[in-house]
Amino acid sequence: MTQTSVPMVEADQVSKSFGSNHVLKSISLTVNRGEVMCLVGPSGSGKSTFLRCINHLEQVDAGRLRVDGTLIGYREKGDKLHELKPQEAALQRRDIGMVFQRFNLFPHMTALDNIIEAPMRVKRMPKAKAVARAKELLARVGLADKASAYPAHLSGGQQQRVAIARALAMDPKLMLFDEPTSALDPELVGEVLDVMKELAVEGMTMIVVTHEMGFAREVADSLVFMDGGVVVEAGDPRSVLTDPQHERTRAFLSKVL
Amino acid sequence: MRLRHPWRNLIAVVIVVYLAAFLWDAARRQPFQWDTYAKYLFDQRVSQAALVTLQLTIYSMLIAVVLGLLLAVMRLSSNPVFTSISWFYLWIFRGTPVYVQLVFWGLLSVIYPTLSLGLPFAPPLITLPTGDALNVFELAIIGLALNEAAYLAEIVRAGILSVDRGQEEAAVALGMTWPQTMWRIVIPQSMRVIIPPTGNEFISMLKTTSLVTAVPFTLDLFARSRDISVETFTPIPLLLVASTWYLAITSVLMVGQYFLEKRFARGIGDARPDGAETRSSPAPQTGPIGAAGSSDAPVLDKREHQ
């Protein structure tokens, strides 16, 4: 990307455990505005948990996470962190879109209703405006004709594209993708990746947890390999993929490439 | 012609023959006194009483639904005070017979001759004699509703728990607050699991209203038809009259339940366009949300948690 390097996401020694299980061990990362970062690693490496900390779906035990300069999920008083009230955390999440492995569309609502729900309820956008915007987004993900379809009537790839449109409807400055293609049949992966590529080209800042190395090579500005709760290796995706410096990276890549 | 299910057909014929014999016999059997039955079936006192019974059912269920929802949400909240209150409520009201509770409500004015509104240990703002504040009809409704709320709370809780955790997460990730998430996303989906047993409770409540005589409230269908039979010495035909009315109201409620189920099965219980999973409505009544939905979206919450 040609933009000057303004950090969008800054993780500073983020740690997190579930009980005695140390999932994140002092993770420090930076994603600049307009950049795409791909997070790869074996399952259980902590990459999804890290992603979920960025919009405070998970609490962090130590360290700081900032999005666009704002501390996420906590308020700093002296050197102590106090967790934000749920309403305050909700306010921060408006600007951070998230796409889930299992889509999590609302099954009792049509595609269009899924998309207008948050703009109308959270941002108090008038219905006509929200609908117009939703139709625009559906067209953008290639589903203009599916506005009135219920999720159960859509293929996995279509559901995931609606889910992306739903996240975009809040005009986020950052998009988080948690294994967006892992639950899809192989022939449906491409249509979702295409939408994501377009988003990247348009300059959206994205963090993508994925196993799609081709996507990482083609689209990502940086690739981060995580294992056992630590960042093992990070850098330019092409060089990490072709010439991994670390033994664990090499072992992992040899299995997935 | 060969019959496909010879045994099934044979059993059906035998049952129909026995049923016909029973009806033929019943139609002519003296103690049923069908002429008295016909005379009182649409007697104004009886139809009025049926209306009172319907009112008791609907009012107490409405209160019970609101209270049950509140208790279920309290039970699921992370606040230990709320969970304890909810647990204690269920322990008391589910653990004692509704008949006994109704007798207690009837004795309310004996136990508490006046009702006061105000802060504890402070002079009350308003004081009313209990008998003036609440009549027996209202006491009956309160008694039925508070008992029912305990059962509905468990039904609602099961419904809420049946909704995939990913739904709540998706809503929260969009910036929705917890009340918005519950009201717009979780509760509508839980309705599919909540409605069938609630319909059951509704019908059960209709019949439980016959216990309000314990309060004592005596204008409901059962008490009224019994009062008439005491005057006329015809208990059996009046029992039949009351049963007919109960059955009629129950049938109407079942129709209502069918349409409610259809309404909340939207997007979930219907067929996929490829016809692979064509389902006839109404939707399956049990099982978690999404089970009948896309095969691409399993219900299991496979969040990576390591």
Image (spheres, rainbow, N blue to C red):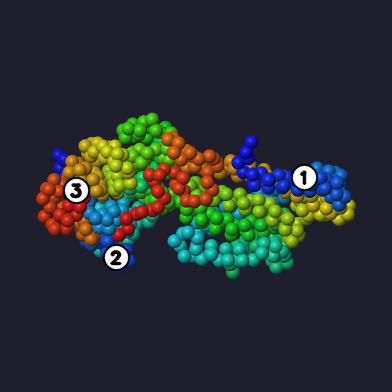
Q: Which residue is mark 1?
A: B20
The percent coordinates of residue B174 (x first, y second) are 36, 46
Label 3 in the same subunit as label 1: no
Q: CA distance from mark 3 to mark 1?
A: 76 Å
> Which residue occupies 30% across, 44% down?
A181
Taking the view exactly as shown, the residue that stands out farthest to the front is B1
**Residue A59 position (above or below residue B24):** below
> Which residue occupies 20% across, 43% down?
A214
Q: CA distance from mark 3 to mark 2?
A: 29 Å
> Which residue occupies 38% across, 44% down?
B296
Name the quadrant containing residue A17: bottom left
- Residue B52 visible, this orientation: no
- Disc 1 marks a residue whose amino acid type is Ala
> Which residue occupies 55% across, 58% down?
B154
Protein chain holding label 1: B
Closer to the eye: label 3 or 1: 1
**Residue A176 position (above or below residue B131):** above
Label placed on residue A21: 2
- N-term-proximal mark, 3 vs 2: 2
- Disc 3 marks a residue whose amino acid type is Leu
Q: Residues within 10 Å of mark 1 (few under 14, many from 20)?
A: few
The one of A244 and A200 positioned closer to us in this rendering: A244
Relative horizontal placement of residue B168, taking residue B254 as reference (left or right): left
Q: Secondary structure at mark 3?
A: loop
- Residue B100 visible, this orientation: yes
Q: Secondary structure at mark 1?
A: helix
- Disc 2 marks a residue whose amino acid type is Asn
Q: Which residue is mark 3?
A: A257
Closer to the eye: label 3 or 2: 3
